[in-house]
Image (cartoon, rainbow, N blue to C red):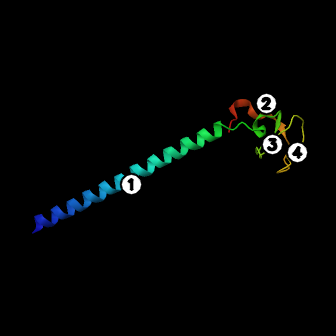
Amino acid sequence: MNLLNNNIISKTILTALVIGLTFTTMSCKDAKKENKTTEKISVEKKGKEHTSAYVCPMHCENSGSDKEGKCPTCGMTYIDNKIHSANGHKH
């Protein structure tokens, strides 16, 4: 009887480990897919809020100008895009 109980306990533990490993593997795959999607979207930003001579530090939609000024959306002072993009500053 003891041998039968030990066998059942061993199978239960093994089943729990397999199920846990399966869920862990599946959740890690989803996280990797999400990171790749986010990186791809951020690289493709080409609007004037990213390409103008002067840009809003928050990159508000439809902001950016060829002259110094303030962002019409958030009110922050535009900064020189060359300075903002220096040292690998990329979104």
Q: Which residue is mark 4?
A: 70
Coordinates of residue 15 in the picture (x, y in percent): 27, 58
Q: Which mark is residue 82?
A: 2
Q: Which residue is mark 3?
A: 56
Write the residue at 86% across / 50% down.
75
Against 88, residue 63 (above or below) is below
Location of the C terminus by quadrant is top right
**Quarter occupied by residue 23:** bottom left
- Which residue is nearer to you in this view: 34 or 76? 34
Against 26, residue 39 (above or below) is above
Q: For marks 4 and 3, give the CA distance.
A: 8 Å
Q: For marks 1 and 2, give the CA distance.
A: 46 Å
Coordinates of residue 11 in the picture (x, y in percent): 21, 60
Residue type at mark 1: give it.
Phe
- Circle 1 — which element? helix
- Residue extending furthest bottom? 1
Q: For marks 2 and 3, give the CA distance.
A: 12 Å
Q: Which mark is residue 23?
A: 1
Mark 2: few, some, or many residues within 10 Å (few <14, many ≥20)? some
Coordinates of residue 76 in the picture (x, y in percent): 84, 47
